[in-house]
Each structure stands twice: as structure tokens, then as C-alpha cells.
Amino acid sequence: MNLLEIRNLHAEVEGTEILRGVNLTINVGEVHAIMGPNGSGKSTLAGVLTGRELYTITEGEILYKGKDLLAMTPEDRAREGLFLAFQYPVEVPGVTNAYFLKTALNAIRKYRGLEELDAMDFLKLVRSKLKLVDLDENFLNRAVNDGFSGGEKKRNEIFHMAVLEPTLAILDETDSGLDIDALRIVADGVNSLRKPENAMLVITHYQRLLNYIVPDIVHVLVDGKIVKSGSKELAIELEQRGYDWVRETTEV
Amino acid sequence: MVTHSNETNILQWYKEQFQKFASRKNGESEKLRFQERLTALDAFLERGFPHRKDENWRFTNIQPITRQCFKIADRIGSVPENVLQQHFVEGAYHIVVIDGIVSDTLSDTIPSITVGSVLRVINDYKEHSHLQNFKPLDKTNSPFVLLNTAFFVDGVWIEVPDNVELMQPIQILFITTDVDTPTAFFPRNRYSVGKQASVTIIEKHTSISLGEYFVDSYTEINLGEQASLHYTRLFEEGNRGYHVNTTRIEQHRLSSLTSNVVVLGGALHRNDFVVSLAGEQCSSELRGLSFASGTQLIDHHTLIEHNYPHCKSTQLYKAILDGKARGVFNGRIYVHPQAQKTDAQQSNKTLLLCDDAMMHVKPQLEIFADDVRCTHGAAVGQLDATQLFYLRSRGVDEVSARTLLTIGFANEALEGIEHLPVRTQIENVVTRKLEH
């Protein structure tokens, strides 16, 4: 069964149409990459998938595990296994990383009929996950992303992902603002979470990230539409020839 | 005209109450004190209750207090043991004040310091005039302080001798019992922390009354040279309780004060907090958290008087307002000409959970020295939509996400509370109130 099926998705922000008929199917075990120039609709797609209120869907549908995704609240989408690693992770002063994550994890577990974790079991779980992204334990007691460096924020997102173990993870420009060392840490973390029973959608502007997180399929999003799909080599070609090449070759 | 006659009536009421009160006080050992009561009463009758035309009371409607004839408390009720235990925090000495009177039987004795009933201490120390009295009466004080001076019966006296460091906090529980008629209480406390002494005092003001009552409390605190005081106050009065509190703190050279005030309950709460920095290199760290819902009103007036050079004061007052609640923050900083190198900061942040709630903020900086650093800032806003979405996108439901963010907002104002059981108690009350 398809994990995610986007059919002819149209979405707008304040009356401006951003997505103009996106079609995309993702199966479990696959890693898809979406590349595209600035303003092509990449982040809008991530926002629509996770249920951000900014966007209005004007046409189309999204099936996730065969269910109508657009009818679900953001929290239910998360509980069904959807996760977004934010392009700009949000600072939440006054709320510790540990407290937030424990609340989130237990909300998800409860939804799935699993027993909630107590403080001890939770700590045991998160300690091992911190190591994946090389974060110190004191990050647990710091307020969520508050005063974190750019690299720390991105690593914290992957840490959350590791704890929540999503079925479909969307990584929105996870490489932006990272130096090469941080990029490697983040990518290693992501790769270790890659499993046959889950899937990922990697959104990026540059091909660089895809050297580390190697996708099965690459899509090119231009002006709110997927105009080209192919193997990972497409990303390299795109990097060499630029987005104008795609525009030219697809216009009939 | 109607207002005027009502006002005359209420003043007449307190005049009559005083006569009854005085007949009970007939045996008061100390003539001087009685004279001061009379002077205070006369000054009060002359001034009357504050009016909304008074700049200091512009946003605070005290009609619930002035339109009611409160009986002066003349009996001590009882509080069930389990209720006391509920309010006690772990790891602290407990002092219990019921209906304005210190209960010796329910209070702990504390080694190496003097603590107990103000009345008893005053009587015991008759010979030492410096211990007998509060600051001399100042007729320009707020009418509520005058009223307290006239009617006070008891309160808590704490005296920490020089060089004594008390590791375990002192918790004082002020609790009013069920009243059949609207009743007024006038507790009056005096804490004195000696040179190089250090102490943590935690006050909790609450009630088991469902009826209408009015607490007019007054506290005087003196910090000796290099003394240190951690002072936490939690006001959780009943739904029909009105509390007007005035606290005056005098700090001497190199002393440090950490003050945390949390107001969660009561229909009307007014807090006047005055810190006078009376020596060089003092530090005062003030934090406040108010959480009002329904038609509650919570008003904080602070005054930091920088009289000497090289002192530092910081203020962070936060308010969470829900329903049709009103909040007031008036932060006054007065820097005298000689108080060079003053560092004074003030910040007020308000979270509005509802469109009908309203906050009035007034920073009031009066600076007469030229080499100082004084800053102030105020912000009023709502929960951040991006933060809310971030939390929800990780599986937290909307209500829980709102609670989490609101607690997060409050946390910054609770950071100064070092005794963890108190902080936990406060966080629990805030959470409960949010879930309502």
C-alpha cells in the first residue's frame, strides 16, 4: 500500500496560489527528495502535509495510510506517524526539551494504545537517542531551542525525530545553515533512522545534502508543480545545469 | 452625592468599629501604641479610601471593599489538620496564622532565631524600645496602611540575629476561616535579618472561606549589612476575598534581596512593594507572576528607591490574564542624585489568553543622577501561533500545547524560587487553573 499519495494538490496563501497540482506517491522504505528553486512551493508542501493553518487547500486530496490526511488535526497526523523537521526550529522559552518531548511521546503512545513512559524509562530512551546526533545530556533540561546555535537546533530536530520514530519524516531544508561537520552529524543521524518500515521526504535547495542522505527518487518542484522525477543522478544533473534547464525541457 | 454619602457611611462604620475595637483593647499595656492607633484612624478618616481619581489607584476599582461594611475580626476559627498539611511545603519550618492571629500550638519553634507573635514579642521586650515598634506612623501612607495601623491585632515577628544562616526555609501560612458575615483582617508582620545573616521566608496567604472577606496586610522588613533574604509570597485567596498588601523593605549596605510574588487567587488583589536601598552595593531581584481569570483584578505597584551609589535592582513581573480579568503593573524607580552607578532594570510581560482581558502597564522612572543605567520594557501579547503549531506537529493536543506554553511563559517569573516544593506547588496550581 502507498504510504502517502498526493493527488492534484492545489494550495494558496492569502489568495496567492502556491501549489498548482502536485502529484506524489511515497511507499514505505523509500526516501524521496524534493528539490526546487526558492519560492517553488517546497515549504508550502511541508506545511500542508503537517496541517499548518496558513494554507488553504483549493483542490486535490492527500491520502496517508489510506486515510484523508487533510481532515486530521496536526496532532493526530503526528500520532499517525508524520513528522516535520522544521526549516526554522521554533524556540519555546520556559519549556524544557525533556518535558516537551516526554509530553509529545506519551501523547503519541497513548493514541496508539501503548503505555505511557515514566520519567526513568523516558530518560533511558532519550539518552541513547542523544548520542545519535552528538548532543550533550544538558540539552534535555534546556528550554526547547532557546539560545541554541543554528547547528544545535537542527540536531535537536533530528533528536526529536529519533525519539518519536515517525513513519513518514519530512526534512525541510535540514541542511540550511549547517557547516560540513554539522551536516555530516545530522545526515548520519538521519541515515541511522532509515528503516524498511518507514519513509522520508527530504526537501532541499541544494544537492549537497543528497550526497549524505542518498534518495531513491528525486523530484523537481517548479512553480508549484513537480515537473521532473528521476533517480538520484537527477540531483547531480540539476546541480550542474540549474533549474532553468528543467523549466526549458518541460515547457512544451 | 450618592457616592459621597456612601463614602461618609463607610467611614462612619470604621469609626464605630474602632470604638468597639478600642473597648476590647482597653487593657492594652502600651499607651503609646494606642495613641498611634488613634492617630492612624483619624488620618484615615480624614483621607478616606483611595479614589480612582488618585493616580495610584486609577485602574483599580476598590468598590468591592468600600461598599461593604466588614466586621473587624474578633474570633479565631479553626482549620482542619488535613487542610494545614495540604498547604505546608516540605522541608520548611511552619508558622501558622489563623484569622490574623499567630497560633503558637500549630507553629514550630526555630533554633537560634526569634519567631512568633508580634504581640507577644512586643510585650516580652517592653524594656527594649527599639524592638517594640514598627516604623513611626507616616500619615502620608496609603489609607490601607493607616487602617492596618489602627486595627492590627497580631502578625509574625521574625528576628534573625547577626551572622545566623538559617538553611531551612520558614513557611508562614496565613489562613482565614469561614466567616458568616463579611469580615476584615489586619495582619501586621515585621521581619528583621541581622548583619551577615541569611534566611528564606515563604508566605502563603489563603482561605477556607466561601464568604466575603477583606485582608489588609502590612509587612515591614529590615535587612542588615550583608544580610540576605529570599522572600517568596504566594497569594491564593478565595473567590470572594479581597487582599490589599503593603510591604516595605529597607536594605542596608551589601545586602541582597530576592523577592518572588505569585498571585493566583482573590477577587481583588493590590500589592504595594516598596524597597528602599539604604546603603551601597545592595542588590534587589524582584520577580512577580499574576494569573487572573474571570473578573479577577491583580494590581502590582512597586517602588525601588535608589538612595546610595552602586546598587542594582531588577524587576521582572509577568501576568497571565484570562476571561475578563484586569491586570495592573506600575513600576516606579526613583534614583536620588547621590545614587550614581545605579543599575536598575524593569520588565513587564503579559500574556492575554482572551480578548476581553486587559492589562494596564505604567513604568515610572524618576532619575536624578547622571551616571546610571536604567532600562524598562513592557510587552503584551497572545500565545504564539508558530510555537503552538510546533508543539502540535509533534503530537501534543491543542489544549495541552496551550497549557505548556502558558506554563513556559510563567516559568521565567518563577526562576527565583529556589525551594523546589514551593515551585512545584505553584506550578500545580497554575496548571489546575488553566485546565478550568
Image (cartoon, helix red, strand yellow):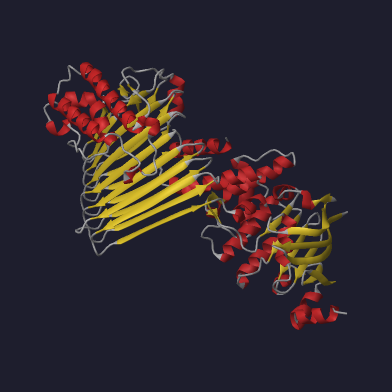
B433 in relation to B363, above or below: above
- Examine the rendered structure and indicate whether residue A111 appears above or below residue B236: below
Tell me: B3 left or right of B34. Answer: right
Report x, y in % for residue B219. 28, 35
In the figure, is residue A205 to the left or right of B201? right
Q: Is residue A222 left or right of residue B117?
A: right
B430 vs B279: above or below: above
The structure residue drawn at horizontal position 42% and vertical position 51%, both measured from the top left corner, is B348
Q: Is residue B126 left or right of residue B103?
A: left
Can residue B284 be seen from the camera position used here? Answer: yes
In the rendered image, the residue lying farthest to the front is B1
Above or below, B337 relative to B160: below
Q: Quadrant of residue A243?
A: bottom right
Specify the quadrant of the image occupied by residue B33.
top left
Name the quadrant of the N terminus of chain B: top left
How many marks overall?
Answer: 0
Q: Say which of B181 and B219 sits in front.
A: B181
Which residue is at 75% across, 66% downward? A17
Residue B109 seen: no
What x and y, as percent, mark residue A228?
A: 83, 73
Q: Nearer the viewer, residue B303 or B116?
A: B303
Q: What x and y, as percent, mark residue A86?
A: 65, 60
- Residue A88 at x, y percent in the picture: 62, 63
Q: Quadrant of the C terminus of chain B?
A: top right
Q: Measuring 69% from the left and 57% from the top, which residue is drawn there?
A: A84
Return the residue nearer the eye: B433 or B268: B268
